[in-house]
Image (cartoon, grey):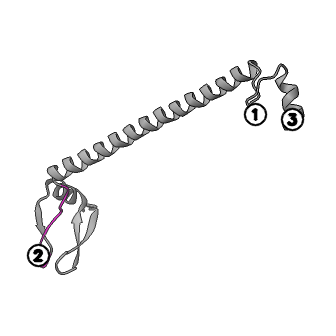
Amino acid sequence: MITYTVTMLVENCCVCGLQFGLETNYNARLRAEKRSFFCPNGHSQRYRGESDAARADRLAREIAAEQERTRLARVDVQHERMMREKAEARFAAKIRRVKAGVCLDCNRTFRNVQRHRASKHGK
């Protein structure tokens, strides 16, 4: 006595809806080769995969989208760098003005800016 185990994949006919089984290795070959096969009622079936042209188009679109995301990220980084540099320049300018004795609130020059700001501006 010989025992043989077969693993089947259940399929549905796209024409009549009949459920039938295909051996898994045979099913894999059909999918890979995109060959026609028939349901038990004789209706032709075929696994339709993505064509090479469609796959190439999809991959080209994905690559273009990724390149656009990369470009936008670089633009964002450049913008943030520019904004940081401007803020640093404004801060440095304020420091220079305070060191030169200029009040940042009223733009007047004083010998003791800190005392002036405390008494006149409450800071």
The residue shown at (32%, 46%) is: 65
- Measuring from the top left, give residue 47's x and y in whole percent: 18, 62
Q: Nearer the viewer, residue 4 or 55?
A: 55
Majority secondary structure of the magenta segment? loop
Q: Is residue 123 visible?
A: no
Q: Of all residues shown, which one is farthest toward the bottom?
A: 16
**Element type where label 2 sits in the image:** loop
The residue shown at (10%, 64%) is: 36
Which mark is drawn over residue 120? 3
Q: Which residue is mark 1?
A: 106
The residue shown at (38%, 38%) is: 70
Disc 2 versus disc 1: distance between alpha carbons?
90 Å
The residue shown at (29%, 42%) is: 63
**Is residue 7 toward the left or the right of residue 112 in the image?**
left
The residue under label 1 is which amino acid type?
A: Cys
**Element type where label 3 sits in the image:** helix
**Is residue 75 toward the left or the right of residue 62 in the image?**
right
Disc 3 versus disc 1: distance between alpha carbons?
10 Å
